[in-house]
Amino acid sequence: SLDQSLRSLGLGCIDVFHLHGVAPDDYTYALETLVPVLVAEGEKGKFKFLGITEIPPEDHEHESLVQAVDEDCFRVIMIAYHMLHQSAARTIFPTTLAKGIGVLIMFAVRVLFSEEGRLQRVVQELVAQGLLQAESIDAADPLGFLIHESGAHSLIDAAYRYCRYAAGSDVVLFGTGNLEHVRANIDSMLGPPLPAEDVARLETLFGALTGIGLDRPDKVR
């Protein structure tokens, strides 16, 4: 697969080669069987850094990456992190910052913040489950407090800026086929951090939650 990718790209070396979507049950196999072979290929000059990616819908607690960041072989990780799923700040980022491991953020927006009405439904479910206090949040506009003159100009803007400036974040990923979306997303990530008081409120409201908004696209209703 690595050799075929190099041939397809017309390159002799790539920067990062990821083991993508490693579930907790597969982590030992990846580490003990795949990694030694890949490390040998990296030593031949085929890639510079070995990375590993989690499967967010199946691994809400980052079980695979909690193990991976303790190893010396993985120099890059890809992890789910967003305004309502902040657990990586507690369990992963302290180690990646200390060891200089590169962090790619996925799920910064996805359907939770882009699909009309989705955020409201999720917040209503969290209130019903007792995970959020009804009096602490406007169920009709849960993140409306982020949109103001000195803050974000949209929910998507807030989502990207929150992830861009999180301590431990190096790269924020997004995918779109719309050129205007590309421009808008880049503008957001080149913008300033969200106001400190807005970030503090996000952490107070949602910092203890985990596994929110990590649905597979075919599971979203």
Image: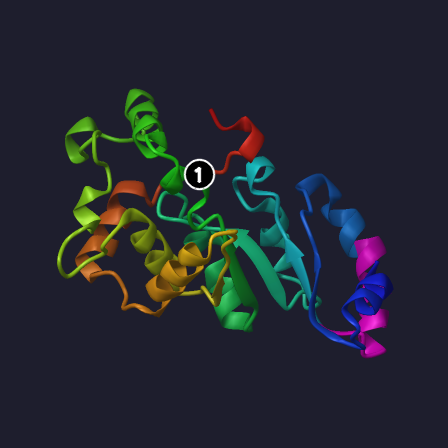
Q: Is residue 99 left or right of residue 68?
A: left
In this view, 85 is above or below 47: above
Residue 194 visible, this orientation? yes
Rendering quarter of residue 197: bottom left
In this view, 46 is above or below 108: below
Q: Tell me what residue is drawn at x 81 percent, y 79 percent.
A: 45
In this view, 25 is above or below 194: above
Q: Tell me what residue is drawn at x 55 percent, y 46 percent.
A: 62
Local secondary structure at mark 1: helix
Q: Is residue 159 left or right of residue 173?
A: left
Q: Nearer the viewer, residue 146 or 50?
A: 146
| Quadrant of the image containing the N terminus | bottom right
Q: Is residue 112 left or right of residue 3?
A: left
Q: Amino acid at mark 1?
A: Val
Q: Nearer the viewer, residue 122 or 101?
A: 122
Rendering quarter of residue 183: bottom left
The residue stretch that appears in magenta = 32-48
Residue 133 pos. (x, y %): 22, 29
Residue 10 pos. (x, y %): 80, 73
Q: Tell me what residue is drawn at x 21 percent, y 35 percent.
A: 141
Residue 25 pos. (x, y %): 72, 39
